[in-house]
Amino acid sequence: MKLTIKEIAQVVQAKNDWSSYKDQEIHAIEFDSRLITSGDLFLPLKGVRDGHDFIETAFANGAVLTFSEKEIEQAHLLVDDNLRAFQALAKYYVSKMKPTVIAVTGSNGKTTTKDMIAAVLSEKYQTYKTQGNHNNEIGMPYTILHMPDDTEKLVLEMGMDHPGDIDLLSSLASPDLAVITLIGEAHLEFMGSRRNIAKGKMGIQAGLGIENELIAPADPIINEFIYDNQKITRFGADEDIYVTQLVEHRDYLTFNSNFMNETISIPVPGRYNATNAMLASYVGLKMGLTEKEIKHGLEHVELTRNRTEWKKAANGADILADVYNANPTATRLILETFQAIAPNENGRKLAVLADMLELGETAPQLHASIFETLDLDILDKVYLYGPMMKYLYDKAAGNPKVVHFDNLDQLTEAINTDLQPNDQILFKGSNGMKLFQTIEHIEKEI
């Protein structure tokens, strides 16, 4: 990180006298005192515990400076709000280092699209991307301040829980290009309506600038929120850019697009991933890559864990895991993909669906609506888990293929008992439902 103590103090407008501190370069900034090493800056945040309680630990681990909202004995920069200071520093740093910033948001597919864009751009440029789920008001500044010094392209994922979240993140990052993957139903509990979700996602324009390109779906729900004279490219059937000649296979896809000659192959299933890869292709072209470079990058993409990933149970059964997040749109899409895949010889097709969280008052109806996508002529058994999935169970009206569980251990035990070596089994649910624990169990125990 190329920042000195003097530089940081000036950016955050520290209110104490820091002039006596040695003006050295800070190695890194961390909000977990356990990660502090020699030469680092500590960021005390208020969560379950007040980060100020860990300042002594941070200095014992090698910190040379800390932000603080109160006067303390250790070397510190006194600010009104540590998080706001952290965000201001990130905003300054991205403008200082001047990487090209590509921002990605959407109700579904944003992490995969971010991974694919980074894989493409890495073919030509020093590229850094959001790590894990660091896509919020803490994680995105952390990503910016941890990018390698030689970063040329910075791919930032922007997540949203509440109104104004994306506006803030976009204003901090000032993207040169922005992508919205989908307007779905995620976070209805906090956003209230799909229109409000669209408004929130369109906040990505806040730091974009009308002269910089926004790539957005053809969904008309966003139309009222497009800034006047905003440069925009729409994607979807018969729009500015779209997928052509899509061919689905069990664990990969091939497709073309209306703006490239190369046929692209990606090592992940799901027709929706063709759209994500198409968006990455378009970004690659805008950034000056050749079609062959784009093709190679997508063929070797590595996705963030638990995004549409084939695994193996200990007994040989095929597991399609997609359990990082879930909303009705994403659940329908993965069900359609799974149901379209031919079963293994002498094997069955099983689906495990867990609650989709943060859907608010409409959660019962939205869970029940998944029944329209379930093809019980194809699926041999459906395991439902969680209180909201009880509404889908009731919609199935006693179909013996559909069973419901309130307890994760009981669900896991039932799958352990039922799963056969030639079966295919899909897992889909919100991360908070912890289906990953069941997957890990059957990978090892059967």
Image (cartoon, rainbow, N blue to C red):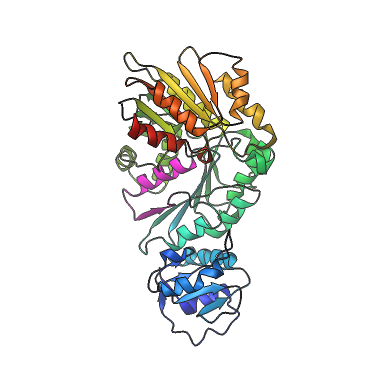
Q: Residue at x 44, y 84 (%)?
A: 22
Q: Is residue 87 above or below residue 424?
A: below
Q: Is residue 271 visible?
A: no
Picture coordinates of residue 147 (x, y %)? 40, 60
**Total labels drawn:** 0
Pick the quarter of the image with the C terminus: top left
Q: Is residue 253 above or below residue 344?
A: below
The reply to whether the magenta stretch includes residue 307 is no
Residue 425 found in image quarter:
top left
| Horizontal side of residue 365 vs 60, given as left or right | right
Pick the quarter of the image with the N terminus: bottom left
- Which residue is situated farthest in the bottom direction here? 20
- Which residue is situated farthest in the top direction here? 377
| Horizontal side of residue 166 vs 344, given as left or right | right
Question: Quick one: 91 or 428, which is closer to the camera?
Answer: 428
Picture coordinates of residue 403 (x, y %)? 53, 21
Question: Quick one: 154 or 89, which is closer to the camera?
Answer: 89
The reply to whether the magenta stretch includes residue 130 is yes
Q: Is residue 301 visible?
A: yes
Q: Residue at x 51, y 54 (%)?
A: 175
Q: Is residue 346 above or below residue 293?
A: above
Question: Quick one: 44 or 151, which is closer to the camera?
Answer: 44
Q: Which residues are magenta?
A: 110-132
Picture coordinates of residue 271 (x, y %)? 44, 28
Q: Residue at x 56, y 79 (%)?
A: 72
| Horizontal side of residue 423 vs 32, given as left or right | left
Picture coordinates of residue 440 (x, y %)? 38, 37
| Horizontal side of residue 43 vs 420, given as left or right | right
Residue 46 found in image quarter:
bottom right
